[in-house]
Amino acid sequence: MLRVLGVDPGLTRCGVGIVDIEPTRRATLVAVTVIETPAGLALERRLLAIGDAIAALLDEHRPDAVALERVFAQHNVSTVMGTAQASGVVLHAAAARGLEVTLHTPTEVKAAVTGHGGADKKQVTAMVQRILRLDAPPKPADAADALALAICHGWRGAASPAARVAGEPATAAAPTPAQQAWRAAERATRARRLDG
């Protein structure tokens, strides 16, 4: 069993989802929340609130790994700065507990859970609900995105806690169709970056 804490970083809303992934790739919801901070609060206070909440979740649920959405440059500099600052707080809290953090692109996450790297938020949310066998879709979107990150990481074939302790390499089973689609989407994204 691999327990993954996924984080969709943000200053106003920071989604956090915790999922248990079995060797069969069956995923089970452990917890999900959105950490919110008001825009009028001083930046250092907002980051402190996010850091304290992340630390409490890490200590309560004791995940084996942390999955974090990779920050991309956007036209809105203030948004990307806030996202990067929130990401730094998560990285710090995880590192303080000796946890490995893996960054995943949005394309990678979408492909992992839906089989298509260009899926929209509604499709991702619907698949997260189905994968985790939930009665209702997780809301808001930040929560669904955080759960999708955790599922993506668990399905990548990350080493189990026992394998990491023993120092053995990860042995992943044959990739699922969704994982194959994710890899194809990642190759296409890398190719576009090289061409551009």
Image (tube, helix red, strand yellow):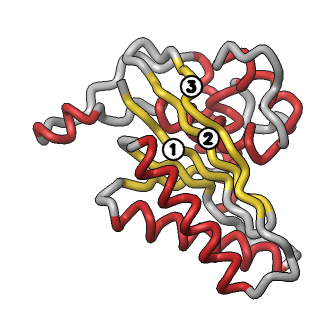
Q: Nearer the viewer, mark 3 or mark 2?
A: 2
Residue 129: image location, x then y, percent: 74, 21
Q: Which residue is mark 2?
A: 17
Residue 127: image location, x then y, percent: 75, 22
The answer to whether 47 appears left or right of 172 in the picture is right
Name the residue type under label 2. Answer: Gly
Q: Are marks 3 and 2 in contact (CB under 8 Å)?
A: no
Q: Residue at x 54, y 58 (%)?
A: 54
Q: Is residue 65 above or below residue 114?
A: below
Spatial distance from mark 1 to mark 3, Cα to Cα?
23 Å
Name the residue type under label 3. Answer: Gln
Q: Residue at x 50, y 56 (%)?
A: 56
Q: Which residue is mark 3?
A: 180
Residues 67 and 58: in front is 58
User: Which mark is on residue 102?
Assistant: none
Spatial distance from mark 2 to mark 1, Cα to Cα?
6 Å
Name the residue type under label 1. Answer: Leu
